Amino acid sequence: MQQAEKLSRAWGTTAEQVLFATGQISEQEYYQALAVHAGLNFTDLDQHPPDWSFFKRVAQRALGQGDIVPLGAGTGGLQVAYAPRGQAARRMARMADEPALGGRLRQNIFIATPGTIRKALLGRFHGVFTQSSIDRLSRQTPELSARYHLLPLQKIFLLVFLISSVAFLLWQPFTAYTAGNLILAAVFLAVTGFRLAAAFRSILLGLEPHEKPVPDIPDRDLPVYTILVPLYREANMLTALVRALKALDYPPAKLDIKLILEESDDETRKKARELDLPYAFDVIVVPNSMPRTKPKALNYALQFARGDYVVIYDAEDRPDPDQLRKAVAAFNEGSSNLACIQARLGIYNPNQNWLTSQFTIEYAALFRILLPALEAIGAPLPLGGTSNHFRRDRLEEVGAWDPFNVTEDADLGMRLSRLGYQSRMLDSVTAEESCSDLGNWFRQRTRWFKGWLQTYAVHMREPHRAWRELGLRGFLTLQLMMGGILISALAHPLFLALILYGSITGAIFRDPGSAFGEALLALNIWNLVAGYIGGVALGLCGLKAAGIRGLGPMVVFIPVYWLLVSFAAYRAVWQFFVNPFFWEKTRHGRARGRDLSVTERKRKISTAPNIP
């Protein structure tokens, strides 16, 4: 204990947390020794379960952070099982030395481990935690929840729009075609313009990758950091994941790592039991319930978080070891309304095949060029699905994640902005696995597009209110990044088919017959050509900024890749109406080189610069 006290002063934590984190003693051994020292009885709640008849009303926060449960009536009153932590353990030891008070303590208080107490609480109140993970946002701000899908007014608007469009097309086909062409061309033009502007900005700022030094923050000043890792059917990823998280440069006693498993996922649960997980790792099992989505699992585990800050990693993620320290420094430097910091995402299997190379180019463009451009103008960030760092109190204040939105990260970025909070980019990289087979990629991209459509539908329920809360830049970002990119993906094959048809039949070379026809034809050709130029420019700039070499020639295949994206967009629209809450699982663990440790990955950057 004396040795642990010295290290606890350096880390800014308690002595028992140091003992647990360094593996010198288990929870069971510590609390048994504490019971002996304080002259109290130790109880195993697995053998002697609590008496829940004494729980009349229980606050949910007390459940999540519970340290005490009732055992029943004793000769001296109500008996309880208690797991004192930190200074509470010291006070209990001192109180037990007082004969009168110590006598009452010995009669009524039994020592138990925090783990068994939480297990008992979960066994009794799992329904409370589960329902909260599902209902929290829809109760708190129902107008911002995707649970209600399309509101009646939105359904009426869509129905009237479709009927009117079909009637107009039948009545005035040429006029309807022209109007539709102009609308789609305007959206395509706006998206292309933003891409070109973002690429030009990155060129002006310089494209060479650079990394800021790790901030020098003493360990004692670092906060407790909760890491949420949702896993489903990913037993094959656990060993490498644990190794990557253990490589994080952060005091072990201040890490609260939640491995979030589904009750029905026997294989992953079995693998987690087989691993010798350090004290910082905590396995959370989410009871079976619908919807079975990643955001619902995150909400469930958040109720047991101990940290002041929260970050999400996926099973295949390999974060830079210094990422948590950089995030803390960024929060310290930011204003009080800075709620979220997004780390850059990169790909660690870029050269596996054609599909992974295109995915790498796309990620480099998004996280190196587009998102920093949005940050520069103070626009909301459509967050990535992983490596989002949050102030926990702000995250809980806005209702956490929407369990009914299958792209919960993009929605949360918009919701934070609407409620007055900021998001920023972080100068740190998390490497993850790109889908290497078309079916897996197609399912993932369908889910992303469906989630963007959900997000757009939710935040456009009251457009005037969204404009007021987001401001002009935020509202335009919503139109551009959520609506515009989806519409562009849907329109791309139409423009391509139109121009190819005109080229094959020769109609594109004939006189359109009017200045307006010539202008419309020129606009369509410009949109297609400029769109490809913008995509290529973004890809090349992103690769340069990320320091990735060797993939430059692959940008010529962007038009083919965009066609695949378009097919996924059409499938997403179909699913949005017939199966909106269905979560299509992305399979991981198929990448070559996925078993590289974080240390090895960092060391090999100089010899293999295509690895972010």
Image (cartoon, helix red, strand yellow):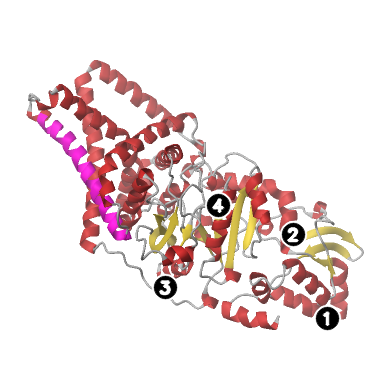
Find disc 1 in the rendering and name its residue. Answer: 97
Q: Earlier in the sequence, mark 3 or mark 2?
A: 2
Distance from Cα at disc 3 to Cα at disc 2: 39 Å
Measured from the top left, where is residue 552 in percent x and y? 27, 52
Left/right of residue 290 with respect to residue 87 in the rendered view: left
Residue 498 drawn in magenta = no
Q: What residue is drawn where x is 55% and y is 54%?
A: 229
Distance from Cα at disc 1 to Cα at disc 3: 47 Å
Which kind of residue does numbered mark 4 sit on?
Met
Left/right of residue 286 with respect to residue 295 in the rendered view: right
Measured from the top left, where is residue 504 in percent x and y? 17, 24
Find disc 2 in the rendering and name its residue. Answer: 117
Q: Tell me the quadrant of the picture where the N terminus can be found.
A: bottom right
Distance from Cα at disc 1 to Cα at disc 2: 25 Å
Eye-nearest disc, 3 or 4? 4
Q: Taken as a whole, is the magenta stretch helix, strand or loop?
A: helix
Distance from Cα at disc 4 to Cα at disc 1: 50 Å
CB-based contact (under 8 Å), mark 4 and mark 2? no
Between residues 230 and 165, which one lies in front from this camera angle?
A: 230
User: Which numbered tag is attached to residue 237?
Assistant: 4
Which quadrant of the structure image shows residue 64?
bottom right
Circle 2 Cα neighbour tier, 10 Å, few/some/many (<14 / 14–19 / ≥20): many
Read off the magenta span: 518-547
Eye-nearest disc, 1 or 2? 2
Find disc 3 in the rendering and name its residue. Answer: 214
Q: Is residue 222 visible?
A: yes
Which kind of residue does numbered mark 2 sit on?
Ile
Q: Earlier in the sequence, mark 1 or mark 3?
A: 1
State the SS at label 3. loop
Measured from the top left, where is residue 343 in percent x and y? 42, 59
Eye-nearest disc, 3 or 2? 3
Residue 525 drawn in magenta = yes
